[in-house]
């Protein structure tokens, strides 16, 4: 997991939440969203040099 992208962090948090709730299909959905995160091509300039993918 990376800590660079806030959206990925958000999805990861939701995934963990779903997992803890025992909702594994939802957890998988969030994992897919995180992996596909479309804005990775334009990255957050907060921490240059770190990559999200
Ligand atoms: Zn991301």
Image (spheres, helix red, strand yellow):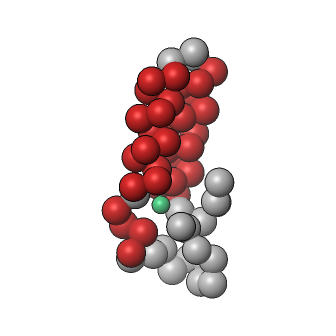
Total marks placed: 0
Is 23 rendered above or below residue 47?
A: above
Drawn side of residue 16 relative to residue 40, left or right = right
Q: Residue at x 39, y 75 (%)?
A: 41
Q: Quadrant of residue 2?
A: bottom right
Q: Identify the residue at image location x=51%, y=46%.
A: 10
Quadrant where the N terminus sits is bottom right
- Give the percent coordinates (x, y) of residue 53: 53, 67
Q: Position of residue 52 (x, y in %)?
A: 55, 67
Query: x%, y% of residue 42?
Result: 38, 76
Can you give x and y, in whole percent of width and height, for residue 17 in the image? 57, 28
Residue at the limit of the structure toward the bottom, as seen here: 49
- Give the residue displayed 64% in from the left and 60% down from the top: 3
Q: Residue at x 59, y 83 (%)?
A: 48
Q: Reply above or below: 24 against 33.
A: above
Q: Is residue 34 or residue 9 the one in the foreground?
A: 34
Q: Is residue 13 above or below residue 5?
A: above
For the view shown, which residue lies furthest in the left direction? 38
């Amino acid at each position: 997991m990376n800590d660079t992208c806030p959206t990925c962090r958000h999805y990861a948090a939701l995934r963990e939440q779903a997992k803890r709730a025992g909702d594994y299909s939802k957890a998988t959905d969030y994992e897919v969203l995180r992996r596909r995160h479309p804005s990775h091509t334009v990255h957050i300039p907060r921490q240059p040099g770190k990559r999200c993918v």
